[in-house]
Amino acid sequence: MSLVLGCATANAAPPGSPFDRLLDRRPIGAHAFTQEHPSWDGRGVVIAVLDTGVDMGVAGLTTVPTGGPKVIDVRDFSGQGIVTLSDAEELQKDGTAFLKSSEVTVTGYAGIPRSTGGALPKLGVLRESAFQNSDVQDLNGDGDGNDEFAVAVVATEKGRTAYVDLSGDLDLADAKPIRSYGVAQETFSFRLRSPTTEKPPLTIALHLDDDGDTVQFHFDDGGHGSHVAGIAAGFGLMGRTGYDGVAPGAHVLSLKIGDNTLSGGATTTDAMRRALEFAGRWSADKKVLVVANISYGISSEREGRTDIDTLTDELLAKYPMLVVATSAGNEGPGLSTIGTPAGAQLATAVAAMMPRETAETLFGSGIKRDLIFSFSSRGGEVAKPDLLAPGVASSTTPEFDDGDIKAGTSMAAPQVTGFYALVGSAAVAQKVPITNTILKRAALASAEPMHSYSLLEQGAGIPNAARAWKHVQAMSRSAEPFRVAGYRVSSPIPTAPGLDGAAAYFRAGTWLPDDDEGHRFQVEPIFFDAGKGQDGFQQVLSWRSEASWISVDRKDVRFRGGNPESIVVRYDAEALREPGVYTGRVVGTPDDAGGVPAVALWTTVVVPHQVDAAGGYGLTTELELDPGEHARVPVLVPPGATSLQVDLSALGFAECRLYAFDPEGHPRAPISPSTSSRSGTTASFRAGEDALDAGTWELVVVASAGSRRASKATLDVQFRALDFDPIRSWSLAPGEHPKGSVKVVNRFDTRFDGRVSGEVVGYRREHDLDAAGDTASESYSLNADIERVDFVLRLAPEVHARFTDVAIGVFDASGNAVVKDGFMSGTARISVPAQGLGSGFRLQIQGARASGDKNGDGFTIRVEETWVRKSPIAIPATELVLYPSVPAVIDFELQKTPPRAPDGYVTYGSLTLLDGVTDSVWAEIPILVE
């Protein structure tokens, strides 16, 4: 089979300055929209950035075009910057008066007023030691991370005021009075050791809680949130006039949900939900449109059915003037890789495109057209992503972060956030009533799909602001989108019996329901105002298939009250014979909403390549890909197969990467990811006996976007079937080394002719690690002969679905993080090098539950530890031939006797069967000897 992709003509872009290429607003129509309507630039709309924080002191995030501050209020829901206040007592020693609390002692407080009633100030202290393992650990540039900055808070009839010790000397004589940022928009930085040659790393704002027990120090020590805010709403980025984000007139709420002392600035329990609730209440209390940007998330083991997905939908139904745009995830290019909270049905999940001109300017790329980034997550079990937008930009960052160019779906989401602010700004100016339903439907209806990409990769496509505004005006005259927040779609998942998804996703061999059965979707209206809108509700939706191979059982369906309705679709199996991925949808349109669809029923059919004995249980595919293009090859595991080997070889010029995804959409790491004719490398992947899950695997080849020539390569897929049991014992006679044997049967009709060798590398154990509350921790001692410790950590799918993040940290005796990682899916793999760790280390796993009052405390992690010694023990190679269906016994002997494994562990190693011609691995037989 031969595939040639990437012949489309390059997209034309409207003219603009070279800076338009660095943060390209043109694809979504934002540039043209604000050129035609300069005052519809986001003013009257608030953008809530749920992220690592926003630095309001950097150029581009200081003001709006009409004057006044860009950022209007701040909160820290992560807990990272929260300082506890306690009562102080006034004491004297050697003639010096001082205030002492349980946390800190200060002097120089005479100039600080008393609280109402004559009470002394409450005291707290921000310690640099709390920033250990953050990107910013030295707040005042003095070269250490040990400073302490006192804060005294007084409460008067005029409100609360904090006096902050900017010098870190615990003397409040020159303390600066600071009010809550939402009251006075006051900021500060700690005084630097060399202020003439350095700039403060952070701009800090305060929020003084009404209860008087805490003060929130708000900052962005991750840089991610400021970058996102600049894309969505920046004005005069880098201090350059005209270099703006998508909606420069919008105000910003900075709602910090990420703790940057954790891996990736991970969220903490309840942070995301509370921040989203805050944004919703703001929209209701202020009667203003709030667009929340969530460029955060992890992979989903249960797409669309995680706790935060559900909570997000509930909040969008609760607050009609709250809109949510989320990043789709960066786990592509495989199918069924949409993350969470991107799976929330009422939120807008945004995939990432690479504009041709931006790629050329930033990377010197030779792509011939706008493309979708390979990392952008794809849909499958959920009808996501919703939209597509540029996913790379140069934007604002705090002083410490010089990485102004960032790429990811994190950068695509704020494009759509700004897009919603523009269209919402038009509605505010023209006094057109709107809801989050109206805005999302208008955006989807306005979108233009990108040529040769499917629904699963781009959703409706790239939205257009002008077209969306027309749809908003048409829908504003209808009653339905003011009562209905959306329509909940559920559909059985053939690959997960008993579970429903938000789309039909057939990846179960070649099976499809027959015409008599069809496939049933259940559609249920979701109402605003706690469901009160369902009283007397009647609505007819007209259904239309957009794919020739999908038919629907009826043209019109009436919805009455809150009752769900079933829609049956049928598939033309004859049109789905050739291997590939087929996607299509049926759309439902209200009879009185300006012709804008309200709901879509997505179907994906994955038709895999099948291999058999006649083809040697293998598949060879020749590929020719233009720069940045990709080819997707689904392959069904044949019965009896125990391993899969994939090799990607250059055919002339080639610069490609190979990706592999298991039947559930989890990415699997290749042995070697890249094929390069320049360097002579060949990409390869192997799924062995313990990893080859039954079902349809997906192999994706992506040509380098940095190249200027088409890549030609051959994809070779080979299944093998060798039956054996793990080696669990050997014999050890006095004065000899361990000896053993294992029986192997070659089940396929291909002879193995090669050699077998092996090694014993160390020892292994598996056990459960229980978390009390949100955190699980275990300490380990190291021996001098250990080189590293490899961990495989697993969470059950129903447990993983409870979290917005699960951060992993490995810490030395001083508390420094030597490994920072996280559970993107239900399985995480980390490697801990022993060098420099001294006598031991501590493993810590911190889960962030979506809701603090749901599912209780505690969870369990399955831990597999492999301790690798510095000097493995070899098992010498011997020649081996395995004929089909003929049992063979492999005898082996270790070169020396390994040390005894610690109690509770097994001695660990493997025997490897290598092909005599290609050196490819046919099997790895595990050694697990007690």
Image: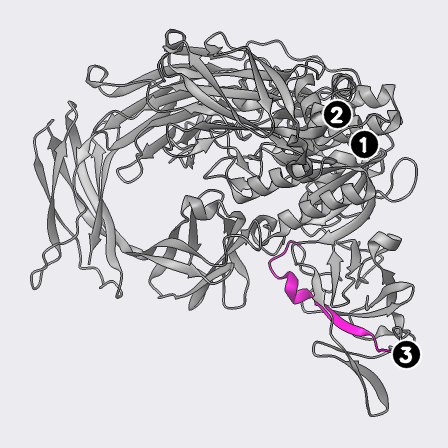
Tell me the residue that label 2 is attached to.
25
Magenta span includes 149: no
Residue lying at 55% horizontally and 62% vertically, measured from the top left: 816
Tell me the residue that label 3 is attached to.
110
At label 3, counting other C-alpha atoms closer than 10 Å, the crowd grade (few under 14, some 14-19, many 20 or more) is: few
Looking at the picture, which amino acid does disc 3 mark?
A: Ala
Residue lying at 41% horizontally and 29% vertically, measured from the top left: 493
At label 2, counting other C-alpha atoms closer than 10 Å, the crowd grade (few under 14, some 14-19, many 20 or more) is: many
User: Going from the N terminus, do you reach mark 3 or mark 2 first?
Assistant: 2
- Image location of residue 589, percent across then percent down: 63, 16
Mark 1 element type: loop
Front-most of 211 and 221?
211
Residue lying at 49% horizontally and 32% vertically, measured from the top left: 337
Is the residue under label 2 in contact with that under label 1 (CB below 8 Å)? Answer: yes
Front-most of 374 and 912?
374
Where residue 151 sits, quadrant-wise, is: bottom right
- Image location of residue 334, percent across then percent down: 46, 28
Looking at the picture, which amino acid does disc 2 mark?
A: Arg
